Image: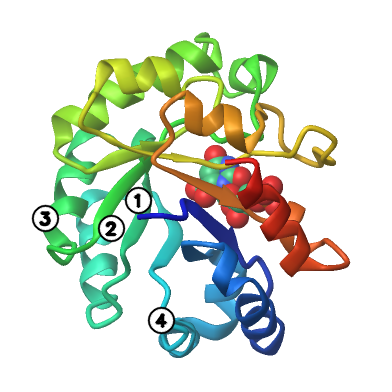
């Protein structure tokens, strides 16, 4: 893949999603559609975005009992996204069943520790590990469960990559050096994330909230 940016089109508005995708399509390698888009536009919306000809990353972050997750993935049949997310903390059986239910061409990647969480947040949900250790623990679990890779922040990706050299590493929470951080807590620059071993970068607001999304995507691409 030449361009490793997946633009996160976090909007319920189909026309806006299509308009941004059309503007940035030559400066990104794929499109990420998440819960906000999917809740509003469903399968039909995903199919319509597929027509732009870019790989689709369907970020539904599934997290439920193994049977429910497997059936939910089976119910997506026909959409065949390039990448699909589940939560690693759903446990080994859920990860195994998610991978078994996914189409062969779909990479199933496990979200380890959301980039919006820091040590205090983890403590508040009963997790004594620092984000770094928690990511590595869940990376091991993901690798053993047979999924294709993980989602983590740029702060952990080098260590995770070392643990799993053949894994596929999705890194969101990336910001240009002067970028607004917003609700993210574990943030690195796009260049630093790639240098540390990211397979792809997920970038939303730095592109979609820019007054000129096309120029913003081009400027970020130029740093890579
Ligand atoms: O799975 C994801 O894509 C994801 C995982 C994570 O830990 N953190 C995270 O921000 N994301 C997604 O990555 C995107 C980041 O958006 P921006 O913060 O606007 O660049 C959003 O669509 C999030 O849902």
As helix, strand or loop, the secondary structure at mark 1 comes to loop
What residue appears at the point 69 percent right and 72 percent down from the top-left corner?
A: 11
Q: Which residue is mark 4?
A: 53
Toward the viewer: 34 or 214?
214
Does mark 2 have its CB less than 8 Å from ligand 1? Answer: no
Gap in angstroms between the C-alphas marked 1 and 4: 31 Å
Q: Earlier in the sequence, mark 1 or mark 4?
A: 4
Which of the 4 image quadrants contains residue 57? bottom left
Which of the 4 image quadrants contains residue 137? top left
Gap in angstroms between the C-alphas marked 1 and 3: 15 Å
Q: Which residue is mark 2?
A: 69
Q: Earlier in the sequence, mark 2 or mark 3?
A: 2
What residue appears at the point 39 percent right and 14 percent down from the top-left corner?
A: 159
Residue 221: x percent and y percent? 61, 51
Quadrant holding the N terminus: bottom left
Residue 39 lies left or right of residue 148; in this view the side is: right
Gap in angstroms between the C-alphas marked 2 and 3: 11 Å
As helix, strand or loop, the secondary structure at mark 3 comes to helix
Q: Residues within 10 Å of mark 4 (few under 14, many from 20)?
A: few
- Frontmost of labels 2 and 4 is 4
Answer whether residue 153 is visible to the viewer in this image: no
As helix, strand or loop, the secondary structure at mark 4 comes to loop
- Frontmost of labels 1 and 3 is 3
Determine which of the numbered discs, if any, sits on residue 100 in the image: 3
Callouts 4 and 3 close, C-beta under 8 Å: no
Residue 86 lies left or right of residue 37; in this view the side is: left
């Amino acid at each position: 893949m030449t361009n490793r940016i997946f633009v996160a089109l976090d909007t319920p508005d189909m026309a806006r999603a299509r308009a941004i995708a059309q503007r940035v399509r030559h400066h990104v390698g794929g499109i990420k559609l998440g819960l906000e888009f999917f809740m509003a536009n469903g399968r039909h919306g995903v199919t319509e975005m597929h027509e732009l000809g870019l790989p689709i990353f369907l970020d539904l972050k599934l997290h439920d009992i193994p049977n429910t997750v497997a059936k939910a993935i089976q119910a997506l049949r026909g959409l065949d996204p390039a990448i699909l997310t589940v939560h690693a903390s759903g446990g080994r059986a859920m990860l195994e069943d998610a991978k078994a239910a996914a189409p062969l061409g779909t990479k199933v990647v496990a979200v380890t520790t959301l980039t919006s969480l820091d040590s205090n947040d983890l403590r508040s949900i009963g997790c004594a590990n620092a984000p770094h250790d928690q990511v590595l623990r869940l990376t091991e679990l993901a690798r053993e469960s047979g999924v294709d890779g993980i989602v983590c922040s740029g702060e952990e990706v080098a260590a995770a990559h070392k643990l799993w050299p053949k894994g596929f590493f999705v890194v969101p929470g990336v910001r240009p050096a002067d970028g607004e951080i917003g609700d993210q807590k574990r943030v690195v620059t796009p260049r630093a994330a790639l240098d540390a071993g990211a397979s792809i970068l997920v970038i939303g607001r730095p592109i979609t909230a820019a007054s000129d999304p096309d120029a913003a995507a081009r400027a970020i691409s130029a740093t890579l």
